[in-house]
Amino acid sequence: MAFEDIIYEKQDGIATVTINRPQLRNAFRGQTVDEMVEAFRDAWRDRSIGVVILTGAGDRAFSSGGDQAARSGGGYRGGMNVEALHEVIRDIPKPVIAAVNGYAIGGGHVLHIICDLSIAADTARFGQVGPRVGSVDPGFGTAYLTRLVGEKKAREIWFLCRQYSADEALEMGLVNKVVPAAQLMDEARAWGREILALSPTAIRIAKASFNAETDHIKGIGAMGGISLGLYYRTEESMEGRNAFMERRTPDFHKFQK
Ligand code: 2NE
C-alpha cells in the first residue's frame, strides 16, 4: 500500500497509523481520511495485529481536524468521508489507542474521542473549534463526548471553543494517562503489549459490548453529516472558514436569529 498523507507501520502485533501532514498541524483532507480508512481496514483483516495506535507526525499536533485550505462553499474538495473513518475506528474488533502528541483540535479532537483509549503527551492541547471556524461535528463528537465528560463539560467544550491542557483532559476523563512527551510512543506501545497478552476474543467481545451501548450515535452522525453539508454552503459557515484562513476574528453578528 502506497500512502501519501499517512505512515502505516506494523510491528510485533501493533499497527501504527500516523497522520503525516505536520506542516498543517496534521490537518486531514479527503485523501488523508481515505488512506486512514484503508489502513484501519488492513489492520482489521491482518490476523497478526491485535492493537492499533493512532498518532500524528512531529511534536506539535495529533491533528487539527479538516484541512480548511481544501474547503470551499461546496464542502471539502473531492469529498471527505469522515463518517467512514469514525465507523472503522469504532468497529474494528481490536483496541485503538490514540497517542496524542500535541494539538487535538476540531475533527482531530473527535478522532481521539472515538479511540478506545487515549494517552497524552504532557504537551498535548485539546479542544473543539467548529463554531469559531464555521463547522460542527455532530454525532460522536458531541453525543459520545458527553459520555466521557458529562453534559455540562461537553457543552462548555463546544459552546466556548477553549483549549484544555493534558492535565485538564485527564481530570475530566478525556484521556487515560498523561506522560512526558518523549515517552509517549513507548507508553502507548507498552499499553498495546499489555493488551496483546490478553485473550483477543474476550477483548473483541468487550469492545463490541461497549460499542452496543452507543451505536445509535452513528445515526445522529449520519444526520449531522447531511446538515453539515448544507451548513457548509452558507455565508455564515464560510465566514468562519475564511476568518481562520485570513487570520482574523470571525464576525457572526449578522447571522444571529
Ligand atoms: C491547531 C492550532 C491551534 C495550532 O495553532 P498554532 O498557532 O500552533 O499553528 P498555526 O500557525 O495556526 O498553524 C500552522 C500552520 O498550519 C495551518 C495553518 O494555517 C498554518 O499554516 P501556515 O501559516 O504555516 O501556512 N493549519 C493548522 N490547522 C489547519 C487546518 N485545520 N486546516 C488547514 N491549515 C491548518 C490552529 O492551527 C488551529 O486552531 N487549527 C484548527 C483549524 C480548524 O479550523 N480546524 C478544522 C475544524 S472543523 C473539522 O475539523 C471538521 C468538522 O468540524 C466536521 C467534520 C470534519 C472536520
Image: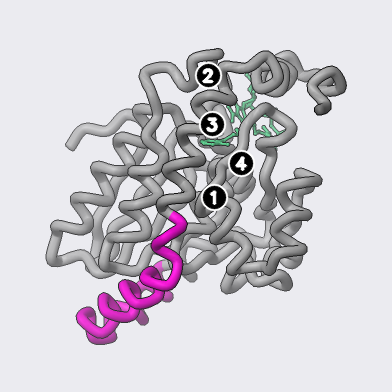
Farthest-out residue, right: 253
> Identity of the amino acid at label 3?
Leu
Is residue 219 rendered magenta in the image? no
- Position of 243 relative to 54 (above/below): above
Q: Give the range drawn in magenta.
A: 189-217
Q: Where is residue 32 in the image (x, y as percent from the top left)?
A: 38, 33
Local SS, label 3: helix
The amino acid type, in three-letter code, at marker 1 is Val
Instruction: Give the vertical position of 224 relative to 166 (above or below).
Output: above
Q: What element carries label 2?
A: strand
Q: Where is residue 92 in the image (x, y as percent from the top left)?
A: 28, 61
Q: How crowded is mark 3: few (under 14 residues within 10 Å), some or many (20 or more)?
A: some
Q: Earlier in the sequence, mark 4 or mark 2?
A: 2
The disc placed on residue 71 is 2
Question: Amino acid type of disc 4?
Answer: Gly
Q: Where is residue 53 in the image (x, y as percent from the top left)?
A: 39, 59
Residue where numbered disc 1 is placed = 110
Is residue 172 positioned above or below 23 on the image? below
**How far is disc 2 from disc 3 in space, using C-alphas?**
13 Å
- Mark 1 near mark 4, Cβ–Cβ under 8 Å? yes
> Which residue corresponds to mark 4?
106
